[in-house]
Image: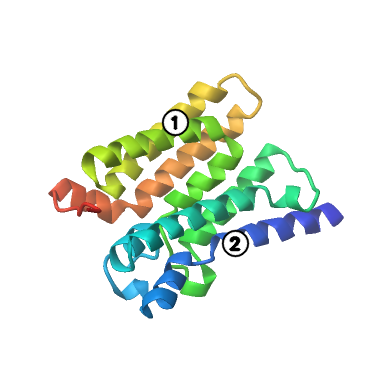
Amino acid sequence: MNNLFLSAFFILAAYLLGSVPFGLIAGLKVKGLDIREHGSKNIGATNVFRVVGKKWGILVLFLDVLKGYMACILPALFGKSFALPFQLLLGISAILGHSFPVWLKFKGGKGVATSLGVFLAIAWLPTLITFGLWILCFTVTHIISFSSLVAAVVFPIMIAWRYAGTPGFRFLLPISIILTVFILYTHRANIQRLRQGIEKKLF
């Protein structure tokens, strides 16, 4: 029962940590505006970058990554140790918290930055390689959504390359594929604009 209680506590804590709307807070504190009523109306770092300012967008990006990372290491902060499947469950909880925050009627961000933090904690090498690809795509196109979509599709390939034949592979690969599908889903409007050639560049 004690372990069950602890598990439930960490899952809830990970969700609540993920649900902290740093983009919304930045808009309110810096410019006194609700970021959900401006730009793309998304609470993520990209919209903060455009509406509130460059440095605030970068800060929100960092904080959204950090909350994903911290969610996965919560047990360690309390001196507890859990296996990889539970770490992944905590990461999923944080991503769902970011995308479906209870405070904002379950309308949040798209989950890319928080996913980056989650997998930096769990599978840092393929995550860094994928992030490097994201940087390359963004440098060439200046389009955040396109770069994120490319990275999302490539990420399971990186997981397969790094973890094939290891005990964690049977957990990491399915979750990475589910994450790819999830990010494609949250970017469905962006995909439509990309197909129409009207997706905006960040700068």
Q: Report helix, strand or loop for mark 2.
A: helix
Residue 99 percent across, percent down from the top left:
46, 60
- Please give the label number shown on residue 168: none
**Left or right side of 135 for 10:** right
Q: Is residue 1 visible?
A: no
Q: Residue at x 43, y 66 (%)?
A: 23
Residue 174 percent across, percent down from the top left:
52, 35
Q: Is residue 45 visible?
A: yes
Residue marked by disc 2 = 17
The quadrant where residue 141 appears = top left
Q: Nearer the viewer, residue 197 or 140?
A: 140
**Left or right side of 61 for 201:** left
- Give the class, few, some or many, for how many residues have Cα within 10 Å of label 1's Cα (few <14, many ≥20): some
Residue type highlighted by circle 2: Leu
Residue 38 percent across, percent down from the top left:
28, 72
Q: Residue at x 39, y 65 (%)?
A: 43
Q: CA distance from mark 1 to mark 2?
A: 26 Å
Residue 197 percent across, percent down from the top left:
13, 48
Q: Residue at x 49, y 47 (%)?
A: 115
- Please give the label number shown on residue 129: 1
